[in-house]
Image: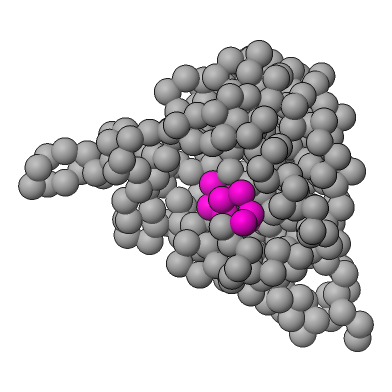
Amino acid sequence: MSKPDLKIKIGSLEMKNPVTVASGTFGYGPEYADYVDLDRLGAVTVKGICSEPHIGNNTPRTFETASGMLNAIGLPGPGAKGFVEKYIPFFEKYDVPLIVNIWGRTLEEYGDVAEQIGAQERVGALEVNVSCPNVKEGGALYGTNVDLFCSVVKKVRAKTTKPIIIKLAPNVADIKAFAVAAEECGADGLAIMNSYPAMAIDIETRMPQLSNRTGGLSGPAIKPIAVKLVWEAAQVVDIPIIGMGGISSPEDAIEFIIAGATAVAVGTANFSDPSTAVRVTEGIESWMAQRNIASIAELRGTVQA
């Protein structure tokens, strides 16, 4: 049997395989280029970019937990202009599609950064972060109120013709309502899910382990939550879903695809093993070949539930 067809599409974005990396876990590309052949990824998704440079939160900004990690990095970045000048040229020597995560503190900022980044020919899609639990301004507020959420999606849609992928918050009463709203407001895809709001305390000092007090929980601990949310959203929308949350093996990724994801993103696992995304891609292909599954589309959404 010939190799399984792993190609997928999100709007006009074409990926040769369904595996990307989660924003915030892979830097801007150069940080991992010495350890991973970027062209073997389905896409590279870079750290969050807003319209102006942003410092982020004070340290400590990360804390290891049982089966996961807490982070409150706070979306530091060089701003749209800085990203375009420093990192777009780096990607000219690669064929891998580029997905840029964007965020803003106001509707105007979302529009500004979408327009600036969306104008770059090398950018394949925008991932719109309306769900970061670690930024005091905007961020999570937009991701947990349907009306505000829709206003962001519409603003970004009006500013770019590039595919837009909306990154959803996990801590909402009904993920389906936000999934449907995103589709109706012009989204080309969904990213499910962002890290889960959480906290850890040092029992000796009685102080939070993070300077921000709370942060986002990621890693294997949240995978069952993410799989459930992907499954729920996939039942009510037709647009593709990038599933993420605790993926560290091919089997993890396949579970998300069976639940209804079109693509997957490897996140926290990049910190302990930078080769994880490539290993997951190869493992999906091998698993499918062993079972005579010709196309990733044949696997998607086949959960018997």
Q: Position of residue 127 (x, y in %)?
A: 69, 38
Q: Residue at x 76, y 65 (%)?
A: 39
Looking at the image, residue 117 sits to the left or right of residue 75; the answer is right
* Above or below, comparing residue 6 to residue 4 in the picture: above
Q: Residue at x 58, y 62 (%)?
A: 32
Please identify the dominant SS of the magenta region.
Answer: loop
Looking at the image, residue 175 sits to the left or right of residue 215; the answer is right
Instruction: State the image quarter where residue 71 is shown.
Output: top left
Towards the viewer: 194 or 135: 135
Q: Position of residue 230 (x, y in %)?
A: 64, 47
Q: Residue furthest left?
A: 204
Instruction: State the image quarter where residue 87 is shown.
Output: top right
Q: Position of residue 23 (x, y in %)?
A: 59, 46
- Residue 180 visible in this rendered orientation of the protein: no
Towards the viewer: 140 or 231: 140
Looking at the image, residue 253 sits to the left or right of residue 58; the answer is right
> Is 23 colored magenta in this rendering?
yes
Q: Tag count in the figure? A: 0
* Above or below, comparing residue 281 to residue 138 in the picture: below
Q: Residue at x 47, y 62 (%)?
A: 271
Which residues lie in the magenta part?
A: 21-30
- Residue 253 visible in this rendered orientation of the protein: yes
